[in-house]
Amino acid sequence: MEYDGVIDTDDQFVILKKGTYAFKVTSVKKARHDGTGGINVVCPKVFVEVEFVQSGATSREQFFLVQKMKWKLSEFFRSIGLKKHGEPLKMDWDAVTGCTGKAAVEPYTSSGGKTYNSVASFLDPPEEKAAEEDPNGFIMN
């Protein structure tokens, strides 16, 4: 919205029930972490906004670019189809916006009492079954 934009809805933030949801990455913002909280080192971080496709609900996920968080980064990039198991990947955050995947979502209530949608884990895409051909050229499943 712009500063003089129009407010045209009274809808509240949609909180999802615990479950698996398809999502689309709607924005990526790079920042610096100041070393406070659970990650006590100064490091780059990335905020990824996802929209859960069928509900319009959103979640803002935070990725700290530190060694001990490689598992979460790997999980995310596999989920959106940019990384394969066991293969290294140079992260390309510019390629992430618009990508889709699936995630396990659980509501999270902060110490201040506000509830948010939180991604418990990003899920691997379903493996595409390679069609096998028999010697006569027929596709076998």
Image: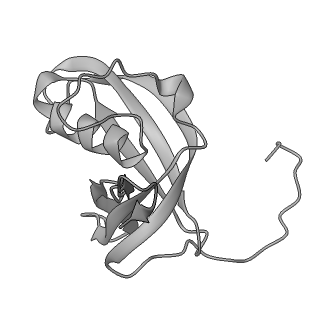
Q: Measuring from the top left, give residue 34's x and y in whole percent.
A: 28, 22
Figure check: 5 above or below 140: above
Q: How is the image coloured?
A: one colour
Q: Residue at x 43, y 77 (%)?
A: 16
Q: Measuring from the top left, give residue 140's x and y in whole percent.
A: 37, 65
Query: Is 106 on the left-hand or right-hand side of 36?
Result: right
Figure check: 100 above or below 67: below
Q: Residue at x 53, y 75 (%)?
A: 14
Q: Residue at x 30, y 24 (%)?
A: 33
Q: Residue at x 38, y 22 (%)?
A: 91
Instruction: Locate residue 2: give its quadrant.
Output: top right
Q: Nearer the viewer, residue 76 or 3?
A: 76
Counting the numbered discs, the total is 0
Where is the C terminus found, in terms of image quarters?
bottom left
Q: Measuring from the top left, give residue 112's x and y in whole percent.
A: 31, 64
Query: Is 71 on the left-hand or right-hand side of 44?
Result: left
Figure check: 90 above or below 17: above
Figure check: 80 above or below 139: above
Instruction: Locate residue 36: give its quadrant.
Output: top left
Q: Measuring from the top left, give residue 8's x and y in whole percent.
A: 85, 69
**Residue situated furthest bottom in the rendering:** 17
